[in-house]
Image (cartoon, rainbow, N blue to C red):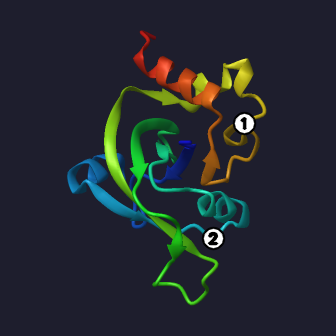
């Protein structure tokens, strides 16, 4: 069974990495996660899972989709094995970005971690919410 996730990334700045860069590079390692709950979510990722790529900072919007291509493994750049990473690959850009403001207007999203725990960088996306985000990305605003 495929799981659905959302990961957040600052699209610019010294530690920034935006979706356009992933689109050019095709694959990357998703790393830099240190929050315990976000790490727990990453440990539950598996090869074939699908991930919404969310730009933080000034943008605050879901912009694209990527696929997990590895199981989680310890980050070789860290001294602690609890810091895991996964390999991901570009899948596609959303037809239109879906902003945090649009998501906040959806009553069915109110208990989702994106709206409740704003600092969390990795979280599961319930299938109903995933489908609604994809639908919002295709609708006329």
- Checking the image for residue 88, the label placed there is none
- Checking the image for residue 112, the label placed there is 1
Vertically, is 19 above or below 106?
Answer: below
- Choose top left, top right, bottom left or bottom right for residue 113: top right
Q: Residues within 10 Å of mark 2 (few under 14, many from 20)?
A: few
**Tag 1's secondary structure?**
loop
Vertically, is 112 above or below 37?
Answer: above
Vertically, is 84 above or below 66?
Answer: below
Residue that carries the numbered disc 2 in the rendered image:
34
- Residue 55 in percent (x, y) is at 47, 45
- Residue 40 in percent (x, y) is at 69, 62
Work out whether mark 2 precedes mark 1 in sequence or the reverse, and give the earlier one. 2
Residue at image position (44%, 22%) is: 137
In this rendering, position of residue 141 left or right of residue 94 = right
Residue at image position (43%, 66%) is: 15
Name the foreground residue: 109 vs 119. Answer: 109
**Tag 2's secondary structure?**
loop
- Residue 54 in percent (x, y) is at 49, 43
Residue at image position (53%, 50%) is: 7
In this rendering, position of residue 65 left or right of residue 38 = left
State yes or no: discs 2 and 1 in contact (Cβ < 8 Å). Answer: no
- Residue 30 in percent (x, y) is at 45, 63
In this rendering, position of residue 101 left or right of residue 53 = right
Vertically, is 7 above or below 103?
Answer: below
Image quadrant holding the C terminus, namely top left
In this rendering, position of residue 129 left or right of residue 88 = right
Residue that sits furthest to the front in the current view: 1
Q: CA distance from mark 2 to mark 1?
A: 21 Å
Residue that sits furthest to the top in the current view: 140
Residue at image position (39%, 46%) is: 66
């Amino acid at each position: 069974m495929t799981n659905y996730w959302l990961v957040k990334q600052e699209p610019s700045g010294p530690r920034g990495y935006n979706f356009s860069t992933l689109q050019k590079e095709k694959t990357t390692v998703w790393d830099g996660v240190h929050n315990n709950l976000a790490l727990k979510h990453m440990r539950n990722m598996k090869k074939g899972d699908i991930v919404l790529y969310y730009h933080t900072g000034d943008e605050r919007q879901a912009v694209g989709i990527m696929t997990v291509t590895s199981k989680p493994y310890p980050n070789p750049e860290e001294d602690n094995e609890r810091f895991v990473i996964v390999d991901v690959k570009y899948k596609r850009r959303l037809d239109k970005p879906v902003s945090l403001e649009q998501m906040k207007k959806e009553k069915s999203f109110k208990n989702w971690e994106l709206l409740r725990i704003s600092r969390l960088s990795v979280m599961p996306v319930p299938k109903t919410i995933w489908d609604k985000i994809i639908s919002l990305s295709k609708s006329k605003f």
